[in-house]
């Protein structure tokens, strides 16, 4: 009986390579002007080129090429000065031409690398950094889609996706666990969204992964791989790789052989099953497309595209640590998406013009990071929202953080301001005024309050002065209650200690 739960076997090594199909964010298809908008009625975006009417000719989309160059620059890859489009021949009902225009020998993007941070999926062990090599990234067109529901036993064909521009990103077989594969896919997903070449919507098929999995004895030659097709969630990727690896280990240990194949992952049964034998390159009979000239990319064009690149996540993380004094952990989370990093920087800009008693931009950056990683992220998760849907703006959050930094409100008061802004809107100052949340920072008023509490509780004063310092919390509680929670905690603690010591 095959296992459905992966059991790590130290005498076996898993080898994983990923092929990621990234839908490029152009408004039109790669070889025609037809729209790429998602969700249109079936076959309403299938123009003459998409459905391969006789006599039509493909015209390359410049925007798709520029997005491919952008990706290559982001991963430090070689950009080919000349690349060639080829015809990949195979028959499938949703492939109108009977071939797919792709790239084979001369892709637009050559070898590069991506640095990933690996978090163990089990929660055990430490996180670590790893570099995964990228073999190539090539441009190609997508096929249509076969629909099997509601057709009374027949299959419907929707050609809206046919001709949609894809960048297929192929890694080296450098990953040795499902955790590494998931970390690589997540990092790649974040990067293509960060540089604006793909919206990364996995539910709509904008970011699809194929995993090539094999097992071997440590130090042995590579084993026979099986390719798991169309993984459209990171959770399914983990489950599929772990099941497939365990299946291969069990098969080999039981005296069987692994045959190269393409497999599908059944998420309901949490298992892989063979779909067809795996094709090799020669099976597709690649040859240069006679309708498309070689693609020439000049150094000047590359530099023009380079100028449009934003600061990349790795550089931004390093800057947050070196210039703002944030921890590596905080910097990693804040650069998890371009939207999060942008929100952080905008909120920090709103905060920094007001001096902080703690002093220094680093203290303010830490305050801002704590709120974003803590309260803001938690509330987004509770409401099922992402960063772009956050109901409060960076300016609003920055305005509230100013009032924490200048001691106008306490942390408890800030949480009430935050809840109100989230549900009702408004600026921090107006909410503080309306709800009477301003802290009492008048040392004279706090001293008077403390004197009255000390005078009313001589027994507890005697306990404190005899060395029972836990009684201090008793006095803090009384003082905060008497001030209705408005006494500045730092000032209150200082005055209380001074008075009790006397």
Image (spheres, grey):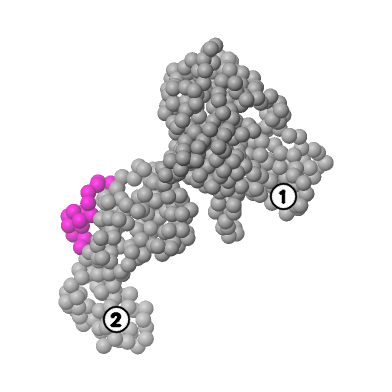
- Residue drawn at x 46%, y 54% as measured from the top left: 315
Pointers 2 and 1 in contact (CB under 8 A)?
Answer: no
Q: Is residue 487 visible?
A: yes
- Residue occupied by mark 2: 497
Between marks 2 and 1 in the image, the one whose residue lies nearer the viewer: 1
Q: Estimate the x, y position of residue 225 in percent, counting from the top left.
A: 71, 39
Judge the density around disc 1: few (<14), some (14-19), many (≥20) Cα neighbours within 10 Å.
Answer: many
Q: Residues within 10 Å of mark 2 (few under 14, many from 20)?
A: few
Total marks shown come to 2
| Residue identifier under label 1 | 13
- Give the quarter of the image for residue 284: top right
Closer to the N terminus: mark 2 or mark 1? 1
Does 95 sit above or below residue 250? above
**Residue 312 horizontal side relative to residue 343, left or right:** right
Q: Image quadrant for the C terminus?
A: bottom left
Please report the residue visible at 44 percent of the width from the left and 22 percent of the height from the top. Answer: 33
What residue span does the magenta drawing correspond to? 423-438
335 or 235, which is in the foreground? Answer: 335
Relative to the observer, which residue lies in front, 219 or 381?
219
At mark 2, the secondary structure is: helix
Image coordinates of residue 412 in percent, x first then y, are: 29, 61
Closest to the observer, 398 or 138: 138
In this view, 437 is above or below 343: below
Q: Is residue 412 left or right of residue 156?
A: left
Separation of residues labelled 2 and 1 (CA atoms): 61 Å
Q: Is residue 293 magenta?
A: no
Give SS at disc 1: strand
Which quadrant is home to the N terminus?
A: top right
Which residue is pictured at 28% across the width and 60% down the height?
A: 352
State yes or no: residue 437 in magenta: yes
């Amino acid at each position: 009986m095959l296992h459905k739960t992966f059991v790590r076997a130290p005498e076996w090594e898993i080898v994983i390579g990923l092929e990621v199909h990234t839908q490029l964010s152009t408004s039109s298809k790669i070889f025609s002007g037809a729209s790429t908008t998602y969700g249109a009625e079936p076959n309403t975006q299938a123009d003459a080129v998409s459905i391969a009417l006789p006599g039509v000719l493909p015209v390359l989309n410049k925007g798709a090429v520029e997005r491919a160059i952008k990706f290559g620059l982001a991963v430090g890859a070689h950009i080919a000065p000349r690349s060639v489009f080829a015809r990949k021949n195979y028959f499938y009902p949703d492939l109108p031409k009977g071939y797919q225009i792709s790239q084979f020998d001369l892709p637009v993007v050559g070898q590069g690398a991506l640095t990933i941070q690996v978090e163990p999926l089990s929660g055990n062990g430490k996180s670590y950094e790893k570099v995964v090599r990228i073999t190539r990234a090539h441009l190609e067109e997508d096929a249509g889609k076969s629909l099997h529901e509601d057709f009374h036993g027949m299959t419907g064909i929707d050609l809206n996706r046919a001709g949609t521009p894809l960048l297929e990103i192929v890694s080296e077989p450098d990953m040795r666990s499902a955790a590494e594969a998931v970390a690589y896919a997540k990092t790649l997903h974040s990067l293509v969204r960060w540089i604006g070449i793909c919206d990364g919507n996995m539910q709509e098929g904008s970011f699809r992964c194929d995993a090539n999995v094999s097992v071997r004895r440590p130090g042995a030659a590579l084993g026979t791989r099986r390719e798991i097709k169309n993984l459209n969630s990171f959770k399914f990727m983990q489950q599929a790789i772990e099941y497939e690896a365990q299946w291969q280990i069990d098969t080999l240990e039981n005296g069987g052989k692994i045959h190269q194949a393409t497999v599908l992952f059944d998420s309901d049964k949490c298992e892989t099953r063979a779909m067809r034998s795996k094709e090799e390159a020669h099976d597709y009979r690649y040859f240069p497309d006679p309708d498309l000239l070689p693609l020439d990319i000049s150094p000047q064009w590359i530099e023009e595209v380079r100028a449009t690149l934003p600061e990349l996540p790795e550089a931004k993380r390093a800057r947050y640590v070196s210039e703002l004094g944030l921890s590596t952990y905080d910097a990693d989370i804040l650069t998890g998406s371009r939207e999060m990093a942008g929100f952080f920087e905008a909120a920090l800009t709103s905060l920094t013009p007001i001096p902080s008693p703690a002093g220094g931009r680093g203290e303010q950056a830490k305050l801002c990071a704590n709120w974003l990683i803590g309260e803001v992220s938690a509330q987004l998760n509770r409401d099922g929202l992402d960063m772009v849907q956050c109901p409060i703006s960076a300016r609003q959050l920055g305005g509230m953080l100013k009032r924490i930094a200048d001691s106008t409100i306490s942390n408890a008061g800030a949480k009430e301001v935050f809840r109100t802004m989230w549900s009702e809107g408004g600026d921090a100052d107006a909410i503080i005024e309306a709800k009477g949340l301003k802290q009492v920072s008048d040392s004279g008023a706090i001293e008077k309050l403390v004197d009255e509490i000390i005078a009313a509780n001589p027994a507890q004063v005697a306990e404190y002065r005899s060395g029972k310092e836990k009684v201090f919390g008793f006095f803090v509680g009384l003082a905060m209650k008497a001030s209705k929670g408005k006494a500045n905690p730092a000032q209150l603690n200082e005055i209380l200690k001074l008075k009790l010591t006397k």
